[in-house]
């Protein structure tokens, strides 16, 4: 009798999965972006929503829920019905590094969310104020900072961001005693770099390029394994002699859903997202933004997440960054 019941339950489960796959999406999908409208993640989410919506024959809305370093928007998705109609478009900090930055976090990415696809990665560039900093490569910057120990400052777009953590690593490794200056976003950080209030930043190539082109900012090195399509003349950190794994890291934008979302629904979202990301139109759009389009499988996304965990954990520990 019990064996028959078990078989019946398995049949019901398979049937439910098939129904989920056949009927999804049954209503508009919402992409939750845990950052303000107008930012890079928002632009990518809206472009992806338009392309996926057209392909799926269903409206995809973008809902910006900024606040608390991405926690507010992330929790919106964690608590949403696990039916594939509420999707998180996340950055590294809210999905990965927050667990090391906050003593108490109301979610655990691996426990509460399912990976769908890594949308794109974003190399960053270390750039100096061309008037105040004589360095023309990474080694010269470190030597100059050593001669000016305690007098060099660097900017980031917020505590716990990669620019903060990477700058802190550079400072601690060389015992350079550099000062971190946190801004509320990349725009004011860039303005102060151009104005000479800070010595260097690690920022997005697209934002810094106009000031690089006019000579007010000098790029020294880019993160990742390959050069930026926006700044192809700038060497990577590895090419510059710094092979620390931290500077091989790339910021990423990823798609995740509530953990118990049916596997066929996750697979459908993965398929549609990957096809959209690899379309000619979106690849060109993302590359123009200085991004590297990916469209990974869910398994590849999770593997990248796991392999990067210890590197990010070390970065946070070295920086001493802690958020409340």
Image: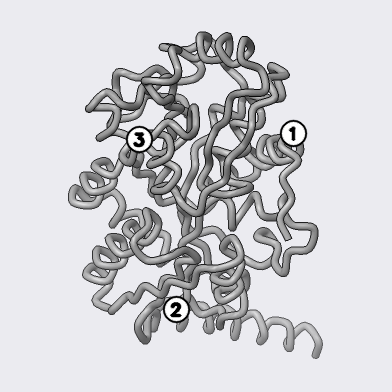
Horizontal and vertical percent for residue 215?
A: 27, 23
Q: Is residue 18 left or right of residue 72?
A: left
In three-dimensional space, the C-alpha distance between marks 3 and 2, rounded to whole angstroms, equals 34 Å
- For disc 1, the neighbor class at 10 Å (few under 14, some 14 to 19, many from 20) is some
Residue 149 drawn at (x, y percent): 66, 17
Is residue 272 visible in the rendered structure shown here? Answer: no
Kindly give the residue lying farthest to the left in the view shown. Answer: 281
User: Is there CB contact under 8 Å for labels 1 and 2?
Assistant: no
Q: Secondary structure at mark 2?
A: loop
Query: The N terminus appears in which quarter of the rendering?
Result: bottom right
Which is nearer the N-term, disc 1 or disc 2?
2
Residue with the mark numbered 3: 205
- Nearer the viewer's eye, disc 1 or disc 2? 1
Which class describes the residues within 10 Å of circle 3: few (<14), some (14-19), or many (20+)?
many
Residue at 50% from the left image edge and 59% from the top image edge: 90
Marks 3 and 2 close (CB-CB < 8 Å): no
Residue 307 visible in the shown view: yes
Image x and y of residue 8, in percent: 66, 86
Judge from the rendering whether residue 111 lies leftward or rightward of residue 246; answer left or right. Answer: right
Residue 135: image location, x then y, percent: 45, 12
> Residue under circle 2?
85
Q: Mark 3–mark 1 contact, CB under 8 Å?
A: no
The label number, if any, that marks residue 119 in the structure image: none
Q: Which residue is mark 1?
A: 318
């Amino acid at each position: 009798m019990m064996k028959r019941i078990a078989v019946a339950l398995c049949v019901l489960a398979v049937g439910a999965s098939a129904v989920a796959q056949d009927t999804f999406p049954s209503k508009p999908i919402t992409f939750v972006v845990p950052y303000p409208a107008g930012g890079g993640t928002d632009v990518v989410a809206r472009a992806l929503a338009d392309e996926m919506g057209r392909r799926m024959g269903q409206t995809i809305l973008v809902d910006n829920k900024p606040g608390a370093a991405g926690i507010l928007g992330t929790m919106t998705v964690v608590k949403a019905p696990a039916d594939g109609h509420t999707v998180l478009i996340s950055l590294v900090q809210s999905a990965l590094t927050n667990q090391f930055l906050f003593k108490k976090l109301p979610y655990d990415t691996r426990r509460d969310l399912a990976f769908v696809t890594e949308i794109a990665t974003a190399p960053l560039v270390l750039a100096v104020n061309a008037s105040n900093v004589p360095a023309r490569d990474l080694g010269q910057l470190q030597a100059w900072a050593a001669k000016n120990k305690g007098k060099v400052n660097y900017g980031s777009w917020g505590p716990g961001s990669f620019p903060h953590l990477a700058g802190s690593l550079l400072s601690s490794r060389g015992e350079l005693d550099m000062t971190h200056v946190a801004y509320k976003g990349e725009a004011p950080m860039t303005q102060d770099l151009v104005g000479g209030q800070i010595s260097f930043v690690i920022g997005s190539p697209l934002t810094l390029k106009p000031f690089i082109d006019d000579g007010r900012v000098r790029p020294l090195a880019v993160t990742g394994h390959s050069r930026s399509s926006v700044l192809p003349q700038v060497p990577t950190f590895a090419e510059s002699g710094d092979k620390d794994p931290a500077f091989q890291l790339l910021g990423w934008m990823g798609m995740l859903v509530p953990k118990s979302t049916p596997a066929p629904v996750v697979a459908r979202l993965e398929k549609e997202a990957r096809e959209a990301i690899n379309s000619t139109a979106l690849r060109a759009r993302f590359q123009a933004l200085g991004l590297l389009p990916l469209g990974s499988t869910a398994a590849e996304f999770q593997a990248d997440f796991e392999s990067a965990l210890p590197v990010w954990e070390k970065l946070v520990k070295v920086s001493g960054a802690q958020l409340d």
